Image: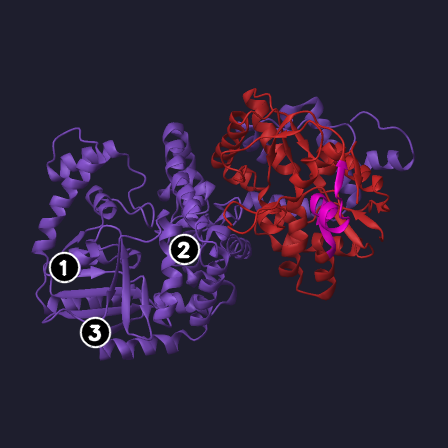
Amino acid sequence: MIHFHPEKARAFVLDDERAHWHDKALWFMRVKRDRAAATVPEWESLRETAEGIKLHTLSRLADYLEEFERNARANGIQVHWARDGEEHNRIVHGILEKHGVTRMVKSKSMLTEECHLNPYLESRGIEVVDTDLGERIVQLAGEAPSHIVMPAIHRKKEEIGDLFHEKLGTPKGLSDPTILTEKARGHLREKFLRAQAGLTGVNFAIAETGGFVVVTNEGNADMGTTLPPVHIASMGVEKVIPRLADLGVFLRLLARSATGQPVSSYTTHFHAPLPGGELHVVIVDNGRSSMLSEEHRRKALCCIRCGACLNTCPVYRRSGGYSYSYLIPGPIGSVLGPHRDLKGHASLPFASSLCGSCTDVCPVKVDLHHQLLVLRQEAGEQKLVPLGKRVGMKAASFAMARPALFRAAGRFARFVLRVAPGLARVGPGAIWSRGRELPVPPRESFADLYDREEAGKPEGRS
Amino acid sequence: MGKVGLFIPCYVDQFFPRVGLATLRVLRGLGLEVEYPRDQTCCGQPMYNTGCSKEARPLAERFVKLFAGYESVVAPSASCVSMVKLHYPDLLGDSAEVRRLGDRTFDLSEYLVDVVKVTKVDGEFRHKVGLHRSCHGIRELRESRSSERMDAPFDKTRQLIGQLRGIELVDLERPDECCGFGGTFAVTEDAVSCMMGRDRIADHVRAGAEVIAGYDMSCLMHMDALARRDGTKLPVVHVAEMLEKARLTR
């Protein structure tokens, strides 16, 4: 998996028009985010506060989770604990089986993607319909989300028209977003009415109240949890925050960072089951506590899944969600995926120019690009860096530790570049010059010029 | 002020000696005592960024030794400076010596503005200039406010070159997007890297820039290599070269 990202990215970039379309669509989100953030004079202190709350919560996570559990139970919510994705799926299936559910609607939850819940339930005869418009599009297309907030951002409206024509029987050639949305709405309305259970993710679980909050723009989570009697909410252990008073800090940051909206259309608080219904919360670890135990990785658990680091990432924008081997793409995915399986996602820590834009845009100040750098060292230690690079770096390090050798090698390289530049087009030089010219070599190095300057002689040819 | 150790990154030494010379002359022009430790080579950043800590460590160790005796260390490259400042403690262990070196190592612009406290720049540069703010200068060294942050704007490089007579700094659509160099990233991910660089150049061209100025030669080298391949007439110039003939006063 060492070459996964560069190969997929190359293919993406090859379609220049589409790659630029993708880049611009996501940059537009970044611009919207900038405008929204600029309206909050205390934006930077808000980020610091959010980071502080998250780090504090992580420092006593077990206590807050238990407090949440106690208060949720007191509200009549049934709380379940899942060690991993498999256990989560088993619990969800158990609840559905008990109620004889064969049709379930689901609002967006990256956690259930992580647990591969849909195929698990489908293979057991349960229809799962994703009700977020973007999620429904990728589900109909048999794809995974290519973005955590805008799952179908890689699809043009014409392609969605074709897909709806094929899967939903809409007239051929539709491309008007309003009409397409209306069609999807009609299709989903029927699914909502027939559903026997609804599943949602959790944006924030509040220890103090035992309630939780789900944020959407389409109201699909509300439809999916008020119509059917059974509501299951799946949450990672890191979603808990201590107090209701803390929530405002995150809500002010979340929508602005994600889509540039001051607030999402629907922020729904759940505290108790519907009359005569059931409300279940499944709290999932699935590798999170091992991340918590490692100091330099802990901060990634602060992530509130706003997607701002994807929108700002110059690499993500130009390589698309599917160039990442992990289900969460972009900078945050390149941290989370390799934590789970470094070998399986060995190209991801390197799928970044380390520009640091992700770290500065992050509403909870996750040090994303520094985590990528740490992961690179781990990849190096485990020999998950391509052999050519390792050998090259060894040779360079050897030469650089010996000034005379460095100077001689430098002089030789400049000579070759001058008289026979073709010879420099081997190895990395060949790749460099696929799209670019090699540097024009000067006759003298700086060290030469320095000696001349010291001797008070005028500058020579350079 | 005590002696300044001039840190000329390996690729600047070999490929952009004029930039090193301009840096030396700018510093000496301020009356500073500047010395170039002859045995310096590379700070180890290429190895470290490739995940090869083991190969980076001996280079970092010799760098610390070579520059231990100077009051300040100054380089015309934000990226190499951030390696020393931010990553040496991770690579070598957080010792007082390493920390002290990091605290005293500066990129040229920040050294001139923060340490020497240059207030007046008397010189000229009669061109329409697109300023390329390199990522490590912005988001590691904080030489200017990043476009992501919402606190008060500042820009140390602009503070200096903006005073040159006749200069016209053009406004870019994306004021600080990465040029795509990224060290070995330029080779590992060359497709995305080239696209990033070309997009950056196009932004400068649209803004009407006649020249791209910057404080990090590696980014400038990358964009120059792309511009030359495409036949785009857009030369690059390092801030040190723009300041070389100017009179700087504190």
Q: Colour of chain B?
A: red
Kindly identify which residue carries mark 3: A77
* Chain of residue at mark 2: A
* Left or right: residue B213 compared with residue A41: right
Query: Which chain's residue wears label 1?
Result: A
Residue type at numbered disc 3: Ile
Quarter of the image with the C terminus of chain A in it: top right
Between the C-alphas of marks 3 and 1, the distance is 26 Å
Residue A124 marker: 1
Query: Would you say residue B115 sits in the magenta stretch?
Result: yes
Under mark 2, the amino acid is Gly
Span shown in magenta: B104-121
Residue A114 position, x and y percent, is 31, 57
| Percent x, y of residue B20 | 76, 37
Q: Secondary structure at mark 1?
A: loop
Task: Give the colour chain A carries in the figure.
Answer: purple
Q: Which residue is mark 2?
A: A337
Q: Left or right: where does residue A242 sit relative to residue B175?
A: left
- Please name the residue shown 12% across and 31% down the image: A171
In the displayed structure, A174 sits above or below B50; it is above
Disc 1 marks a residue whose amino acid type is Arg
